Image: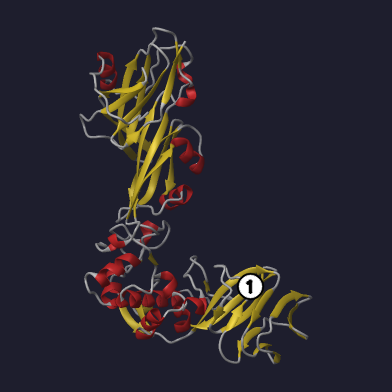
C-alpha cells in the first residue's frame, strides 16, 4: 500500500468551496461526539543550510576559496573578518584545561621528569607513573617508592621529550603533550592543565579542526584564526585559558600532529588577525550554507563587532551540510522537545539575521503563541544550524481524537499549511477505501494570523466535507508534505 501513489481526482463539493472561502480556521464537525474536544494534528518537514553557529570563518568556505579561487590565507581571512589587519604576536604560553573534577591525576614520561612547586622538587625516573591526589591541605605526589607533599599546585616538567597523561582528557585522549602539566585544586577536585607555548598548542589544534589534506592556504588561514582565538581567550586571573574540546578549540596534543599542518603553523608563525590594533575574537565553524552571520544576530545579547559581519560564502558548497534535510517530524515529537501546552501547529520565523538564520521564532500551538530564541530552538530540536525552514501541514480531527460518525453522517476535515501557499494553489485529500487510495484536489485560502508582539504570519487553510460509507483513513498532501493520517470510524 502506497499512500502517496497518485490517483484520479474529482472536483470538491460546493460546501467545501464555500467553507474555505469564508476563511474558516474553525473546526466544524457533523458527527457523533463533542466536536469542541477535537484538536488539530500536524506533521513537519524541516530543511536548512550550514553546520555551526555561522559567525566568522566558514572552514569549508575557506577550503573552497583556496582550492577553486586560489586565494591566499590573508585574502581568505580578510573576507570572513571584515576590515582586519595583521600583526605579529609573541609565542606566549596557553593553559589548556585537559580535565577537571578528578580525585587523582596520573602522568608519566619516557624520560626522567620532575614534580616541583616553589623550592620543592621530586625527581621521577623515566617510565614511572606519578599519581597526584589532594588531602589535608596538600597535594600528594606518589611515584613508585618516592612521595612528596606540596603546599601549592605542582608542575610536572620533562627532562626531554614530552609528558603523557594517563588520565583521559575531556576528549578521551591519553597521549603525549608538549609543554608542562600543572595539577590544581578547583571546586574541591583536581584539574589537569597543559601549559604549552602558543605555536606548539596550534600544532595540536589545526589538524583536529580541519583535515591536513586541505590546500595549504586553507590550513594557514585556520592556523591564524586559531592563534587569534587562543590569544583572545587568555585569562590571567584564572588557572586556565581554554578547554581542550569544542567548547573552545579541539586540542589533542602530539598524537594528532601532521607535517602539513605543522608547516602551516610554521609558515604563519606569529601572524595574527587584528582590528584597530587588538587581537580579534576569531570565531569559526564548519560550513555556512552560503552566507555567514552577524554576531549580534547569531548570538542574541552579543554586542555587534565590526569584523564579525555576515558575508557571502559562495564556495561553502563543499561542506556536506551546506544544505540539509528534509527532516520529517510529527508535531508530537517536536512538542515534546520544545515543551508547552496545546497541539503544535507551526514554527514560524519572525526575525532573521543577515544570512538569514532564525533570530526569533513563533511557536504556534492550538492554545496560543509563544516565542523562542533561534539558538534555543536549534538546541532543543538538535538541528545543524539556525538557518532553518519549517513547513507544517495539519488535519482536524486529529488521529488521537478517534473521530466517530453514525452511518450517513458527515465529517468536515480541515487543516492549515504553514507557510502559506501561493493564491489559487490546491492541496490533495487522500482516503483509503475499497483496498486502494483515492484522492481529489481541495482549494486553499490564504489567511493572516496575528502572533502578538507586532508580528503576523500567513498560512493557507483548507477543508473538505466527507460522508464515508465505512470506516476510512484520510490525510492531506501538498508536494512532499503530508498531514498525519486520521481515521473516521463509522458505526
Q: Which residue does the numbered mark 1 point to in the structure image?
A: 167
The quadrant in which residue 395 appears is top left
Looking at the image, residue 228 lies above or below residue 480: below
Q: Which one is in front, 26 or 334?
A: 334
* Extreme residue toward the top, this view: 408
Give x and y (percent) for residue 4. Answer: 32, 31
Quadrant that contains the N terminus: top left
Tell me residue 135's x, y (percent): 77, 74
> Colour scheme of this structure image?
secondary structure
Q: Which quadrant holds residue 423?
A: top left
Could you tell me residue 416's position as x and y percent? Answer: 34, 30
Say which residue appears at 28% left-offset and 35% top-offset. Answer: 479
Question: What residue is shown at x 38% (from left), y 85% (from top)?
Answer: 266
Q: Report whether 52 appears left or right of 155.
A: left
Relative side of 313 to 45, left or right = left
Q: Secondary structure at mark 1?
A: loop
The answer to whether residue 421 is above or below residue 81 is above
**Mark 1 nearby-residue class (10 Å; few <14, some 14–19, many ≥20):** some
State the image coordinates of residue 323 (x, y, percent, origin top left). 32, 53
> Residue at 73% of width from left, 75% of height from top?
133
Residue 397, by quadrant, is top left
Question: In the image, is 239 to the left or to the right of 479?
Answer: right
- Regarding residue 480, the answer to whether it shows in the image is yes
> Which of the two residues, 130 or 96, is positioned nearer the viewer here?
130
Relative placement, left or right, of 425 versus 216 is left
Tell me: residue 367, above or below residue 201: above
Q: Could one spot residue 347 in this view of the protein?
A: no
Q: Is residue 450 above or below residue 321?
A: above
Number of marks present in the image shown = 1
Amino acid at each position: 500500500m502506497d499512500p502517496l501513489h497518485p490517483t484520479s481526482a474529482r472536483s470538491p463539493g460546493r460546501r467545501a468551496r464555500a467553507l474555505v472561502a469564508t476563511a474558516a480556521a474553525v473546526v466544524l464537525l457533523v458527527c457523533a461526539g463533542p466536536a469542541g474536544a477535537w484538536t488539530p494534528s500536524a506533521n513537519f518537514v524541516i530543511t536548512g543550510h550550514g553546520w555551526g553557529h555561522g559567525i566568522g570563518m566558514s572552514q569549508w568556505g575557506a577550503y573552497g576559496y583556496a582550492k577553486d579561487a586560489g586565494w591566499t590565507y590573508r585574502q581568505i581571512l580578510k573576507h570572513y573578518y571584515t576590515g582586519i589587519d595583521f600583526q605579529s604576536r609573541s609565542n606566549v604560553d596557553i593553559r589548556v584545561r585537559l580535565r577537571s573534577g578528578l580525585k587523582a591525576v596520573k602522568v608519566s614520561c619516557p624520560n626522567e621528569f620532575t614534580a616541583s612547586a616553589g623550592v620543592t622538587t621530586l625527581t621521577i625516573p623515566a617510565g614511572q607513573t606519578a599519581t597526584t591526589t589532594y588531602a589535608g591541605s596538600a597535594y600528594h605526589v606518589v611515584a613508585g617508592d618516592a612521595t612528596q607533599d606540596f603546599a601549592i599546585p605542582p608542575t610536572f616538567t620533562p627532562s626531554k621529550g614530552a609528558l603523557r597523561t594517563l588520565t583521559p582528557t575531556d576528549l578521551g585522549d591519553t597521549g603525549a603533550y608538549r609543554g608542562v602539566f600543572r595539577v590544581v585544586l578547583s571546586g574541591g577536585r583536581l584539574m589537569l592543565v597543559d601549559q604549552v607555548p602558543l605555536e606548539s598548542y596550534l600544532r595540536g589544534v589545526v589538524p583536529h579542526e580541519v583535515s591536513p589534506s586541505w590546500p595549504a592556504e586553507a590550513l594557514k588561514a585556520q592556523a591564524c584564526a586559531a592563534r587569534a582565538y587562543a590569544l583572545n581567550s587568555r585569562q590571567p586571573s584564572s588557572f586556565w585559558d581554554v578547554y581542550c574540546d569544542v567548547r573552545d578549540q579541539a586540542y589533542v596534543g602530539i598524537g594528532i600532529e601532521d607535517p602539513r599542518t605543522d608547516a602551516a603553523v610554521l609558515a604563519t608563525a606569529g601572524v595574527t588577525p587584528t582590528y584597530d590594533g587588538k587581537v580579534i575574537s576569531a570565531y569559526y565553524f564548519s560550513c555556512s550554507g552560503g552566507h555567514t552571520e552577524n554576531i549580534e544576530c547569531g548570538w542574541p545579547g552579543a554586542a555587534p563587532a565590526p569584523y564579525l559581519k555576515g558575508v557571502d560564502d559562495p564556495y561553502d558548497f563543499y561542506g556536506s551540510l551546506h544544505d540539509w534535510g528534509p527532516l520529517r517530524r510529527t508535531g508530537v515529537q517536536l512538542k515534546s522537545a520544545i515543551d508547552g501546552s496545546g497541539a503544535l501547529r507551526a514554527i514560524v520565523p519572525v526575525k532573521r539575521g543577515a544570512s538569514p538564520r532564525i533570530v526569533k521564532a513563533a511557536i504556534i500551538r492550538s492554545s496560543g503563541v509563544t516565542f523562542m530564541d533561534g539558538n534555543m530552538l536549534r538546541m532543543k530540536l538538535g538541528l545543524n544550524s539556525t538557518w532553518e525552514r519549517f513547513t507544517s501541514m495539519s488535519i482536524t480531527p486529529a488521529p488521537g481524537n478517534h473521530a466517530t460518525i453514525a452511518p450517513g453522517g458527515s465529517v468536515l476535515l480541515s487543516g492549515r499549511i504553514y507557510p502559506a501557499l501561493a493564491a489559487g494553489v490546491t492541496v490533495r485529500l487522500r482516503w483509503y477505501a475499497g483496498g486502494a487510495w483515492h484522492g481529489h484536489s481541495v482549494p486553499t485560502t490564504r489567511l493572516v494570523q496575528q502572533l502578538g508582539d507586532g508580528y503576523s504570519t500567513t498560512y493557507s487553510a483548507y477543508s473538505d466535507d466527507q460522508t464515508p460509507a465505512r470506516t476510512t483513513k484520510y490525510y492531506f498532501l501538498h508536494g512532499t508534505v503530508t498531514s498525519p493520517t486520521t481515521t473516521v470510524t463509522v458505526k
